[in-house]
Amino acid sequence: MAGATEPTVELLLTRGVHCLGIDAPSIGPAHDPVGVHVRGLGQGMVYVECLSRARRAAPRGAWFCFLPIKVEGSTGAPGRAIALLPATES
Protein backbone atom coordinates (compact mmCIF):
# COMPACT_ATOMS: atom_id res chain seq x y z
CA MET A 1 0.00 0.00 0.00
CA ALA A 2 1.55 3.32 -1.04
CA GLY A 3 -0.65 5.26 1.34
CA ALA A 4 -4.04 5.07 2.96
CA THR A 5 -7.02 7.34 2.48
CA GLU A 6 -9.34 8.62 5.21
CA PRO A 7 -12.19 6.33 4.02
CA THR A 8 -9.80 3.34 4.16
CA VAL A 9 -8.77 4.17 7.72
CA GLU A 10 -12.43 4.67 8.66
CA LEU A 11 -13.37 1.25 7.23
CA LEU A 12 -10.52 -0.43 9.11
CA LEU A 13 -11.58 1.25 12.35
CA THR A 14 -15.18 0.03 11.93
CA ARG A 15 -13.77 -3.50 11.48
CA GLY A 16 -11.83 -3.26 14.74
CA VAL A 17 -8.37 -2.74 13.25
CA HIS A 18 -6.15 -0.72 15.57
CA CYS A 19 -2.73 -1.28 13.99
CA LEU A 20 -1.99 -0.54 10.34
CA GLY A 21 1.36 -1.50 8.83
CA ILE A 22 2.53 -0.40 5.40
CA ASP A 23 5.69 -0.61 3.32
CA ALA A 24 5.68 3.12 2.49
CA PRO A 25 7.48 5.83 4.49
CA SER A 26 4.23 7.60 5.38
CA ILE A 27 0.71 6.37 6.11
CA GLY A 28 -0.88 9.17 4.11
CA PRO A 29 -0.29 10.82 0.77
CA ALA A 30 2.96 12.80 0.63
CA HIS A 31 1.18 15.95 -0.54
CA ASP A 32 -1.34 16.01 2.36
CA PRO A 33 -0.53 13.50 5.12
CA VAL A 34 -2.34 15.27 7.96
CA GLY A 35 -5.93 14.06 7.34
CA VAL A 36 -5.17 10.34 7.36
CA HIS A 37 -2.84 10.66 10.35
CA VAL A 38 -5.35 12.60 12.41
CA ARG A 39 -8.26 10.28 11.56
CA GLY A 40 -6.56 7.10 12.75
CA LEU A 41 -4.48 8.47 15.59
CA GLY A 42 -7.51 10.30 16.98
CA GLN A 43 -9.25 6.92 17.36
CA GLY A 44 -6.25 5.18 18.94
CA MET A 45 -4.91 3.55 15.79
CA VAL A 46 -1.18 2.84 15.64
CA TYR A 47 0.77 3.10 12.38
CA VAL A 48 3.88 1.08 11.53
CA GLU A 49 5.60 2.45 8.43
CA CYS A 50 8.50 1.28 6.25
CA LEU A 51 7.84 -2.44 6.69
CA SER A 52 9.65 -4.82 4.38
CA ARG A 53 8.59 -8.32 3.37
CA ALA A 54 5.17 -7.91 4.98
CA ARG A 55 3.62 -9.96 2.16
CA ARG A 56 5.40 -13.03 3.54
CA ALA A 57 3.03 -13.03 6.52
CA ALA A 58 -0.15 -15.05 6.25
CA PRO A 59 -3.23 -13.00 5.28
CA ARG A 60 -5.01 -14.47 8.32
CA GLY A 61 -3.74 -16.11 11.46
CA ALA A 62 -0.33 -14.45 11.76
CA TRP A 63 0.50 -12.66 15.00
CA PHE A 64 2.23 -9.30 14.46
CA CYS A 65 4.28 -7.41 17.02
CA PHE A 66 6.25 -4.18 16.68
CA LEU A 67 8.99 -3.59 19.23
CA PRO A 68 10.02 0.09 19.20
CA ILE A 69 12.89 1.57 21.13
CA LYS A 70 12.00 4.27 23.66
CA VAL A 71 12.94 7.74 22.45
CA GLU A 72 12.31 10.41 25.07
CA GLY A 73 9.98 13.17 23.89
CA SER A 74 9.31 11.46 20.55
CA THR A 75 6.01 10.59 18.87
CA GLY A 76 7.62 7.73 16.94
CA ALA A 77 10.63 5.46 17.01
CA PRO A 78 12.48 2.87 14.98
CA GLY A 79 12.01 -0.71 16.03
CA ARG A 80 11.83 -4.35 15.04
CA ALA A 81 8.72 -5.83 13.44
CA ILE A 82 8.10 -9.56 13.85
CA ALA A 83 5.36 -11.92 12.74
CA LEU A 84 4.65 -15.38 14.04
CA LEU A 85 3.11 -17.43 11.28
CA PRO A 86 0.45 -20.10 11.84
CA ALA A 87 1.57 -23.70 11.64
CA THR A 88 1.03 -25.32 8.26
CA GLU A 89 -0.44 -28.77 7.93
CA SER A 90 1.81 -31.30 6.23
Image (cartoon, grey):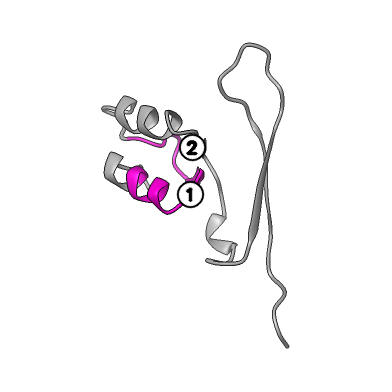
Classify the position of the C terminus by image quarter. Answer: bottom right
Q: Position of residue 16 (x, y in %)?
A: 47, 50
Q: Position of residue 31 (x, y in %)?
A: 26, 28
* Residue count near mark 2 (Cα–Cα under 10 Å), binned few <14, some 14–19, many ≥20: some
**Relative depth, front residue between 29 and 39:** 39
Q: Secondary structure at mark 1?
A: loop
* Residue type (three-letter) at the residue carrying disc 2: Met
Q: Secondary structure at mark 2?
A: loop
x 50%, y 37%: residue: 47
Q: How many marks?
A: 2
Q: CA distance from mark 2 to mark 1?
A: 8 Å
Q: Which of marks 1 and 2 precedes in the sequence?
A: 1
- Report the side of 26 relative to 86 (left or right): left
x 29%, y 42%: residue: 5
Up/down of 21 relative to 71, above or below? below
Q: Position of residue 73 (x, y in %)?
A: 62, 11
The magenta segment? 9-28
> Mark 1 = which residue?
17
Q: Position of residue 3 (x, y in %)?
A: 35, 42
Up/down of 3 relative to 41, above or below? below
Quadrant of the image occupied by residue 62: bottom right
- CB atoms of marks 2 and 1 within 8 Å: yes
Up/down of 2 relative to 61, above or below? above
Quadrant of the image occupied by residue 34: top left
> Mark 2 = which residue?
45
